[in-house]
Image (tube, grey):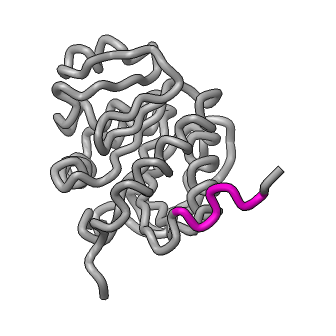
Amino acid sequence: MNDTIGVGIASGLRILVIVGHDYEDLELWYPKLRLEEAGAHVTVAGPVGGQVYSGKHGYPCRADAALAEMESADFHGVVIPGGWMPDALRRDGKVLDLVRSFAAEGKLVAAICHGGWIPISAGVYRGVRVTGSPGIRDDLVNAGARWSDEPVVIDGNHVTSRRPGDLPAFCRGILAVLARRGAGGPRTP
């Protein structure tokens, strides 16, 4: 087996991962670690920078930064884990503005499971082919998305998956989009 598959594919890319209370543990940690393995710099941002957030299953995650300080221009994409967190953060105007900016700039917008609630509230799914937790299927369809029950759906810069069991396909989809779109990245310091 080749242990270097995907290593370096995201070298130099910057990815924002959103965190908040009751995030789905695996849906945050698996993509975060996979992206780091592929060479990306991952920033985890929550409502309060430096705060430790507990996942649904109790796994802690310390936010590197506050969401209020984040700008899409500094990143190549955003990953939105599921859990109950997205239902709370979809009410935060800054979070919605961030997701709208990522989508408008053609950058990666990746959401898994209930993470789709945030792009729904940001209004970026109209006409986009997506999947997500079966529990939010009606929300996705009512937001104008074209629903598909698959482990991963890639539509342009959007990558979506249904549940933790789809994480390998979700991460392959994220890396495929980043490999294709990596050149249009954040501003340089």
Quarter of image, res 39: bottom right
**Bounds of the magenta segment:** 3-9
Front one among 164 and 54: 164
The stretch drawn in magenta includes residue 6? yes
Q: Residue at x 38, y 53 (%)?
A: 78
Q: Residue at x 41, y 62 (%)?
A: 48
| Whether residue 42 is situated above or below residue 167 in the rendered picture | below
> Measured from the top left, where is residue 2 in percent x and y?
78, 55
Image quadrant for the C terminus? bottom left
Q: Position of residue 104 (x, y in %)?
A: 16, 50
Q: Is residue 143 magenta?
A: no
Determine whether 68 is above or below 56 in the image.
below
User: At 38% across and 18% down in the image, what residue appears?
Assistant: 136
Q: Is residue 76 left or right of residue 2?
A: left
Number of marks: 0
Magenta-highlighted stretch: main secondary structure?
A: loop
Answer with left or right where residue 185 lies relative to residue 8.
left
As drawn, 14 above or below 134 = below
- Residue at 43% x, 24% y is 132
Return the x and y of residue 52 as percentages of the image width and height. Answer: 57, 59
Q: Residue furthest right?
A: 1
Q: Is residue 1 left or right of residue 11?
A: right
Task: From the viewer's perspective, tell me whether residue 45 is left or right of residue 164.
Answer: left
Q: Quadrant of residue 101?
A: bottom left
Residue 74: % across, % down: 30, 71
